[in-house]
Image (cartoon, helix red, strand yellow):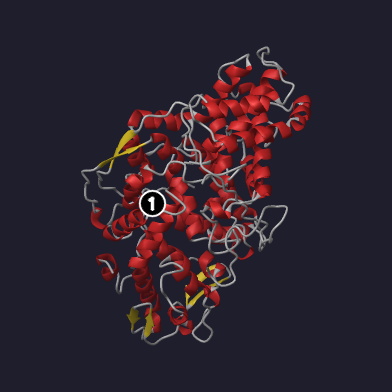
């Protein structure tokens, strides 16, 4: 952990814990996992108005709802639901062509030195490959494997997207897991009208740095807030689902807090030109693009680092966080020497420049890298060689492999998987797509059902997708969703420290956050808030109109989980509803029917089968 950093998760929600500058907190929750996967949903619908009676009665039944949820969590879920048949996901690999893409929870509980580097000597910065990804230099193909692994398609949907939708269910049913994954690894080939509609709501994200400075007051947060809301909107609605998951992953890996005062004019370009452009490209391209981007120079004080007064912030983080990792074996001298080599850059009045007079010259030896660095004018070339050396270092390969395996497989991923992914990373010159293909095709992934929780943003997005929330008419709708999630301690892109949000369940233990997510889920299901979004409300949540409690429980289970509710899930819903004065039979369209639907949906969206993946 970098000096002075609180570990992600030290905060305990909006009601307590150590505050941080942008108001974000990192509350988390941990519990035992439910191993049942979500499966198959009905079609979605639109919003509804607020019923005062519904609000009053729902408030009165909040304790009963909590009791039902507690019952479900204590006794586990599923245990009788229809299990989706496993499908074969082949590890056979194919070449991936590069293409450019410019796009623009725990809730109540939670579950458990390559040829490329050598060739870079004396060359200019490399052109970044597109977000659709490149399998490796010169179209490298990963070796085809004979072995075939059985993977539950629901597990793949749960981990490689922000949560199931009827469209994603139909897509993986039609294509099969292997073809579905390959399609997601090439996002430029996927039509994305809903994602493009989100882009259209934020035209300011197309601004150059100069345009942002001309349109905004110095220090204004307007564009930065739009970056965060846009990030959330694409997570909710884009058809390029795995790509959006990876955008979030890399945003945490190369974290620049958003909003953050000093990057008011540059943060949007970092998200587009560094993260979104390279999210499925190669890591060395992304590292090079990030290192001297005006946003990174400002955030980690590179613009204040000179030969006479070198600043160690970026030099430390590029080793500790971005490349070899906190246990990579570097020393303080490595950091100090790195800082000297990385001097010379400025960003003043909206313009980035390299000033040879500010660059340290003389031989530099840092973490096994050795360069004469005799000519200040050639400082950028020496810096690129060092960054490429780090990007291709075996310790970096293992660090990236560990982080990917932690995010997609388990909080404590098997060493066998990490070793395998590190080898793929190195063999493919840091290309990301082959590593993901190997990860999702691995037996370790196939055996990892229930090992990961959904953090607050992931849970709220998954819940919105499950019940069929639609985007609003303008960006204000997504901004309302942003503040809901921020209040739960997981504001999109909002972690204030360079280490990014934690990806482990142990860091997300906060009753305050859990309560915020539960209350927000209740409001969203009832159609109360955020009203600018297209909320179906209980009136339009189901395509059928069941008139008995039993039928409602079944229909809502199919909507949320994509399958019939399991025995314990059904028992929890019965216990919850028995604590209300709602009848067991009702008229279609009645308030009693709508409230039974809403309470059952809220319960199931707080169940282990939805909170863990």
Q: Nearer the viewer, residue 533 or 579?
A: 579
Q: Is residue 533 visible?
A: no
Q: Nearer the viewer, residue 332 or 514?
A: 514
Which quadrant of the view contains residue 289? Answer: bottom left
Which quadrant of the view contains residue 461? Answer: top right
Q: Vertical placement of 74 versus 593: above or below?
A: below
Total count of labels? 1
Q: Vertical placement of 521 versus 255: above or below?
A: above
Q: Nearer the viewer, residue 551 or 31?
A: 31
Badge 1 crowding class, 10 Å Cα cut-off, few under 14, some 14 to 19, many 20 or more, is: many
Q: Vertical placement of 580 versus 321: above or below?
A: above
Coordinates of residue 15 in the picture (x, y in percent): 73, 52
Q: Vertical placement of 300 versus 470: above or below?
A: below
Coordinates of residue 567 in the picture (x, y in percent): 53, 26
Coordinates of residue 62 in the picture (x, y in percent): 73, 33
Q: Which residue is mark 1?
A: 280
Residue 580 lies left or right of residue 269; in this view the side is right
Q: What residue is at 64 percent from the left and 63 percent from the top?
A: 261
- Give the structural element (helix, strand or loop) at label 1: loop
Q: What residue is at 59 percent from the left and 71 percent from the top?
A: 4
Q: Nearer the viewer, residue 586 or 31?
A: 31
Coordinates of residue 122 in the picture (x, y in percent): 30, 74
Which residue is the extreme one toward the front?
Answer: 75
Q: Is residue 10 visible?
A: yes
């Amino acid at each position: 952990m970098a000096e002075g950093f609180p570990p992600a998760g030290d905060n305990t929600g909006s009601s307590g814990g150590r505050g941080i500058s942008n108001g974000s907190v990192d509350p988390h929750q941990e519990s035992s996992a439910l191993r049942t996967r979500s499966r198959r949903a009905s079609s979605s619908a639109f919003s509804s108005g607020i019923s005062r009676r519904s609000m009053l009665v729902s408030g009165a039944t909040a304790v009963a709802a909590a009791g039902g949820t507690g019952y479900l969590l204590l006794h586990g879920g599923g245990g009788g639901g229809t299990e989706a048949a496993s499908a074969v996901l082949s590890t056979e690999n194919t070449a991936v062509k590069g293409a450019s893409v410019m796009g623009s929870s725990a809730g109540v509980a939670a579950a458990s030195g390559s040829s490329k580097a050598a060739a870079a000597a004396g060359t200019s910065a490399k052109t970044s490959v597109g977000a659709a990804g490149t399998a490796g230099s010169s179209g490298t193909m990963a070796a085809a494997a004979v072995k075939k692994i059985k993977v539950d398609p629901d597990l793949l949907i749960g981990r490689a997207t922000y949560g199931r939708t009827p469209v994603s269910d139909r897509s993986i049913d039609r294509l099969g897991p292997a073809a579905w994954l390959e399609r997601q690894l090439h996002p430029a080939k996927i039509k994305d009208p809903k994602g493009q509609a989100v882009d259209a709501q934020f035209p300011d994200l197309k601004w150059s740095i100069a345009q942002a400075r001309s349109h905004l007051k110095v220090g204004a947060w307007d564009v930065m807030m739009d970056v965060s809301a846009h990030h959330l909107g694409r997570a909710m609605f884009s058809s390029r689902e795995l790509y959006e998951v990876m955008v979030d992953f890399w945003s945490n890996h190369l974290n620049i807090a958003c909003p953050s005062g000093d990057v008011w004019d540059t943060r949007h370009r970092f998200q587009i030109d560094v993260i979104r452009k390279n999210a499925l490209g190669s890591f060395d391209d992304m590292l090079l693009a990030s290192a001297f981007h005006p946003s990174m120079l400002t955030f980690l004080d590179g613009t204040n680092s000179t030969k006479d007064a070198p600043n160690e912030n970026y030099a430390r983080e590029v080793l500790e966080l971005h490349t070899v990792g906190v246990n990579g074996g570097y020393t303080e001298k490595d950091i100090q020497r790195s800082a000297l080599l990385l001097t010379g850059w400025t960003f003043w009045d909206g313009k980035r420049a390299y000033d040879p007079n500010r660059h340290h010259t003389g031989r530099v030896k840092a973490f096994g890298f050795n360069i004469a660095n005799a000519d200040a004018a050639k400082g950028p070339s020496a810096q690129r060689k060092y960054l490429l050396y780090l990007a291709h270092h075996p310790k970096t390969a293992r660090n990236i492999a560990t982080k990917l395996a932690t995010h997609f497989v388990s909080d404590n991923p098997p060493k066998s998987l990490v070793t395998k992914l590190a080898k793929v990373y190195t063999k493919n010159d840091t290309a990301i797509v082959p590593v993901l293909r190997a990860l999702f095709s691995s037996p370790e992934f196939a055996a990892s059902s229930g090992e990961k929780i959904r953090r607050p943003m992931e849970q709220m997005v998954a819940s919105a997708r499950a019940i069929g929330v639609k985007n609003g008419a303008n960006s204000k709708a997504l901004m309302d969703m942003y503040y809901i999630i921020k209040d739960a301690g997981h504001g999109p892109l909002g972690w204030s420290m360079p280490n990014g949000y934690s990806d482990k369940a142990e860091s997300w233990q906060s009753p305050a956050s859990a309560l915020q997510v539960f209350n927000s889920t209740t409001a969203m299901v009832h159609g109360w808030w955020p009203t600018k979004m297209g909320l179906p409300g209980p009136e339009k949540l189901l395509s059928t109109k069941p008139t008995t409690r039993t039928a409602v429980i079944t229909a809502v289970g199919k909507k949320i989980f994509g399958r019939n509710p399991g025995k314990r899930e059904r028992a929890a819903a019965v216990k919850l509803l028995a604590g209300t004065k709602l009848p067991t039979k009702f008229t279609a369209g009645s308030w009693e029917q709508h409230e039974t639907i809403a309470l059952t949906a809220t319960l199931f969206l707080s169940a282990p089968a939805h909170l863990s993946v």
